[in-house]
Amino acid sequence: MAYYRAAASASQPSPARVGVLLVNLGTPDSPTYFAVQRYLRAFLGDRRVIDTPRLIWLPVLYGVVLPFRPLRTARNYRKIWMQEGSPLKVYSRRLAAKIDGELKSSLGDGVRVELAMTYGNPSIAAAVESLARQQVHKLLVLPLYPHYCSSTTGSVFDATTRVLQHWRWLPETRFINDYHDDAGFIAALSAQIEAHWQEVGTRSHLLFSYHGIPAVYVANGDPYQAQAETTTRLVAARLGLESGEWSHCYQSRFGSVVWLQPYTIDTLEALAKQGVRQLTVVSPSFAVDCLETLEEVAMEYRHRFLACGGEELRLVPGLNDADRHVRALTDKVLSALKGWI
């Protein structure tokens, strides 16, 4: 087999198109032990995700994590699994389909949209190859992470370039790093919180819970924490919240190393001790609802908050395929495509 693969051909008579590749993290194909194990092997085996020397990490991964962690993780996935599949994949597909419709209404047949996952299916390789078959000669990559992080956004870049490095003819490529302070995103997120409060009939203390990362990543230059704090400040200001009406923290800690603080679990306990009884939680680092929002926040954290004396913890639904989210990301794509179309 040749090392370099044929892809889109510049000599094809059909018109050259622009491709938009939307990428999310990934999900198991089913809520079963072996499917979850395959997913975790790919995810936790990525050096962008776990930046520990391989001689130390791989024995832990294969000897401790992969034999046992899939048992619990599969159980948690079964709690939230939808008829159409994993919530992350279902909502990502719906979001991609709507963005595709918006772009086609604006740009016609000159654009193609594909969804891919960094780990699992649909793979980045399959999505990029599909775009090539559709005569895509220019490629825009949009990771579905509002905040840049080496272990998420960086992994999308790595995976995409690994696919392209074996192509004989390369598409001109652009990459969107983040959209943490994008006006459309801030407006959509703020409107989502307002709509939730209107639905439940009351405002309550707003907890911004972001996915955590090891603190050393930030010490080594990752901008994730600064970008997350910026999002929180912008949304709190747009909602007109005073300093005592909101809190900022980080969830989903894994392993024994120090992660970004304050931890969400500790914040829940502290708020309950301060007399906060009603709590609204929003997770801005997730473009769509997934295991970390639907199970970790809405179930596990709710149980913990109630056990500490709280009375109610409500999760603000993810932006998912809401029209305001679709519009914000479509506008971001259109801005990035300037000069191409």
Image (spheres, helix red, strand yellow):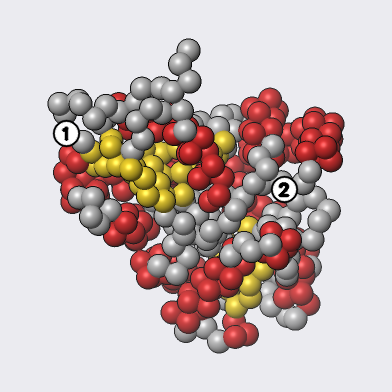
Front-most of residues 220 and 66? 220
Label 1: how many Cα within 10 Å (few below 14, some 14–19, many 20+): few
Q: Quadrant of residue 43?
A: top right
Query: Which residue shows up at 47% across the image and 65% down it?
Result: 180
* Residue 216 versus residue 162 in the image, above or below: below
Front-most of residues 198 and 54? 54
Three-letter code for the amino acid on which mark 2 is drawn: Asp
Label 2: how many Cα within 10 Å (few below 14, some 14–19, many 20+): some
Query: Which residue shows up at 31% across the image and 48% down it?
Result: 99
Q: Quadrant of residue 54?
A: top right
Badge 1 marks a residue whose secondary structure is loop
Determine which residue is flagged by label 2: 51
Q: Position of residue 63 (x, y in %)?
A: 84, 31
Q: Quadrant of residue 12?
A: top left
Q: Mark 2 and mark 1 in contact (Cβ < 8 Å)?
A: no
Determine which residue is flagged by label 1: 15
